[in-house]
Amino acid sequence: MHPLRQLMYPSSIAFWGASNNPMKMGTMQLANILGTGYLGQVFPIHPTETTVMGLPAFKSISDVGSPVDLAQLTLPTEVVPRVLDECGKAGIRRAIVISGGFKEVGGDRGKQLEKEITDIARTHGIRFLGPNCVGIFNTLLDLNSTTIPLPPGGGKIAFASQSGAYTAMINPFLKSQGIRMCQTLSVGNEADIDLVDCLDYLEDEPQVEAIGLYIETVRRPREFLRSARRVSRKKPVIAIYVGGTEAGSRSSLSHTGALSGPDAVYDGLFEQAGVIRAFDVDQMFDFLRALASQPAPAGERMAVISNSGGPGSSLAYHVEKAGLSVPLFSDELSRRLDAITGRLAYVRNPIDLTFDTNTGLFKQLLETVFESGEVDGAFMYGLFGGPDFIVNLAKRFPDFAKLGEEWKAGYTEFIGELSRVPEAFDMPLVVMSFFGADSPTVSPLVEGDIPVYPSASRAARAMKALLDYRRIRDTEGGG
Amino acid sequence: MHPLRQLMYPSSIAFWGASNNPMKMGTMQLANILGTGYLGQVFPIHPTETTVMGLPAFKSISDVGSPVDLAQLTLPTEVVPRVLDECGKAGIRRAIVISGGFKEVGGDRGKQLEKEITDIARTHGIRFLGPNCVGIFNTLLDLNSTTIPLPPGGGKIAFASQSGAYTAMINPFLKSQGIRMCQTLSVGNEADIDLVDCLDYLEDEPQVEAIGLYIETVRRPREFLRSARRVSRKKPVIAIYVGGTEAGSRSSLSHTGALSGPDAVYDGLFEQAGVIRAFDVDQMFDFLRALASQPAPAGERMAVISNSGGPGSSLAYHVEKAGLSVPLFSDELSRRLDAITGRLAYVRNPIDLTFDTNTGLFKQLLETVFESGEVDGAFMYGLFGGPDFIVNLAKRFPDFAKLGEEWKAGYTEFIGELSRVPEAFDMPLVVMSFFGADSPTVSPLVEGDIPVYPSASRAARAMKALLDYRRIRDTEGGG
């Protein structure tokens, strides 16, 4: 069993640094552990308090008297070595060291302390995340040891990050985008566990369908290459790298003690490793949500189904700009599509339904183009879940609110059916919508694991990432 | 006075196509006009109904008996010519023709009908938007004639679009991003009023600080060039163009009857015209919100102020990738910054405060770098408005909720002060945050007209657009 398995699925946690002062970082973290629904045992360790947030507190780990799977240390730098040693003596073999003030601060003392804790850990066989990290979350266990409340769970995305902010502070962004993650690991200074370990661990996590990495440096390039090549055959790996400019590199050095290299070196490494590079964190999650949910397309031929000219044209343009194609449909397929739309709508690709909110049509059209053999994937714009927009109408027509609710119910059922089409045909579907993730229009799509983007270019690039992954998987599989 | 002035600021509107059936597009539009707070007179015209949504309805415009500034026609194609003629005879000189089925459908009949209404309009001196458009909104008048409720008002952005979807359906996206527009015009087939007219009109709208255009074709390139060159000396103009690929062009032709040209032709046109091209609609609004609110930087030297390593490194990287620079601060400036932070924080640029939520520091640091003469603009990450994240903490510490509210109040006041710094120094500030537009953290920034982006690359490119505009303005001004 990979060492991270026990760290990510602990039955019990000893916690240092939480008190009854809500302004302390440790208190915030323990409040999240307690408030998220974690069902394991939690033992606050505190030198003076007898209870912490209502839980019995222990003066030291030796007072706990029962085995503990994981220690989280949110403590002043100088006391970390002593406490880690006590953990080892008490039989704890996994730890998360939140504390900063180690190698990343640049002085000799920090480096020495980091070596000290690494040696102590090695002596006791402790594997640990950090120091200078923000913790983990695992929605499969309702476990969240960061300062930030959990994003919505149920996802198939895992993320390992050399930045703490990207690990946890990003949660409101994920929530607003309808992006669901199941596991996140903040690796901090990587004194022990690093991104390579995270890749190895996530390879065998059955829930995880796509892996994201935030990278300022790869400390073990050879091992990274070997692991990533192997993992990317099974699951897509998307990385962002921000060390490749002068100031980017200067900044990375200062906060994680990382020596970064030029962009081109990392581009080469990622290419060899079968890792897809995203430009920034928003693009990384754009790619991950498609890769975690949709089948990879067999080729570049895309259908565009829209009920509005502008988004249809934009999708056509950006699909081609992304290196995919929007082939003109055959006469036969066009006739079949025309029979469905029964109107003047343009059906040669893009299909433009003109203003139509009949969601049933979209499914019929999608199945027809998927059946035809003329495309490898599809884009859709124009789904409309009902009550989003009727606020002023509802003022004038009180009965209309009821109609809106009926519409919404029918729509939700329809999206459930639509969501199963990509898997049935083994072809990807990507949706463009201006509605928010919690709107009646988009939330059933989020539930149905259909990726939704607010712009044509983002939708198109996510589809391209799916095709890129198909090629990586095929190449790696044959290699 | 520009003809669009009366169309955008009507004292009275006659409306065709609304009834007491909430499923009709005209009804949705009139419900928005009535429900948004428009204070002018509204006259529904309907052949059989005596009242429409509680308003007295008129059989024909000749029954109204008082002068009318604007007609909106949401009618079957075939009756539009007759009604437009009646409008002319009744003295109406401005109209919005929502109805489709004209040139955009491709047949001879559509073309003939479009010529017919254009001739009728000319005979009566009517200037009109459309046909095949979705209406307008003008938040300065609480006037919204589209099917979609208004986005938040109070903005300085205007938008003219050849796509109806981008005009109105995009409102929930704008709302979620905290983007505020004051005026939008959907030009449809541009049978009369086109994008050039919109530019000319918006040039003199005092509230409008930045103009966006969605373009599938420029029908009058010479006039566009002349107008845009003149307008862009006064106000930034950002355009997206999606006709430049094979399928993009095919799609545009089908829905607005527009003949588009290759990307390079439009790039050349935009460059000559002083128009900044954005890649897609999300990027256009990224640029517009910065351009409508921040001073243009005098040069490319940027400060990065962050309380977290990852976003700091990402900003440093993406600022350089965008063609700006992150200069190393002088010893003197570094000493001054160190005196403010009083800690081991890295202050040579990027400034990394490490985890600190003391918002007061940010303003001091910003003023210090702006005063130094060593930068032309600044980026900020790490502002934190309080109660966003304390949900689990508040469960354990009931008193903490009160503390959170105090924090929020102090933060809101602080952001008010921070928001005035860019204008005081005539230097731009751009913020990166993962919080949503309606969060306690970001909403005071939206109020204070500070643009906020959820990723480093988006923030950096928006700043680059500010610099691009500075250069356009300087060049145009000298030419």
Image (spheres, coloured by chain):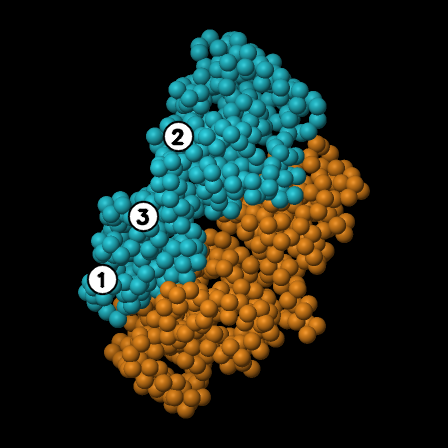
Chain colours: A cyan, B orange
Q: Which residue carries the number 2 mark?
A: A203
Of all chains, the one bearing label 1 is A
Q: Secondary structure at mark 2?
A: helix
Q: x, y (%) of residue B118?
A: 39, 85
Residue annotated with mark 1: A333
- The quadrant the C terminus of chain A occupies is top left
Q: Earlier in the sequence, mark 2 or mark 3?
A: 2
Image height of A235 relative to B449, above or below = above
Closer to the chain start, of discs 1 and 2, is 2
Q: Nearer the viewer, residue A416 or B205?
A: A416
Q: Position of residue A266 (x, y in %)?
A: 54, 40
Q: Which mark is residue A382?
A: none
- State the CA–CA distance, disc 1 to disc 3: 20 Å
B320 sits to left or right of A209: right
Real-space CA distance between mark 2 and mark 3, rounded to the nearest whole angstrom = 24 Å
Q: Nearer the viewer, mark 2 or mark 3?
A: 3
Q: Residue flagged by tag 2: what amino acid is it?
A: Glu
Q: Residue at x 66, y 20 (%)?
A: A112
Residue ID for mark 3? A298
Locate the N terminus of chain A and report the quarter of the image it occupies.
top left
Marks 1/3 same chain: yes
**Residue B186 on image: x %, y %:** 43, 71
Give neighbour class at mark 3: few <14, some 14-19, many 20+ (Cα, 10 Å).
some
Given the image, on which type of amino acid does mark 1 rest? Leu
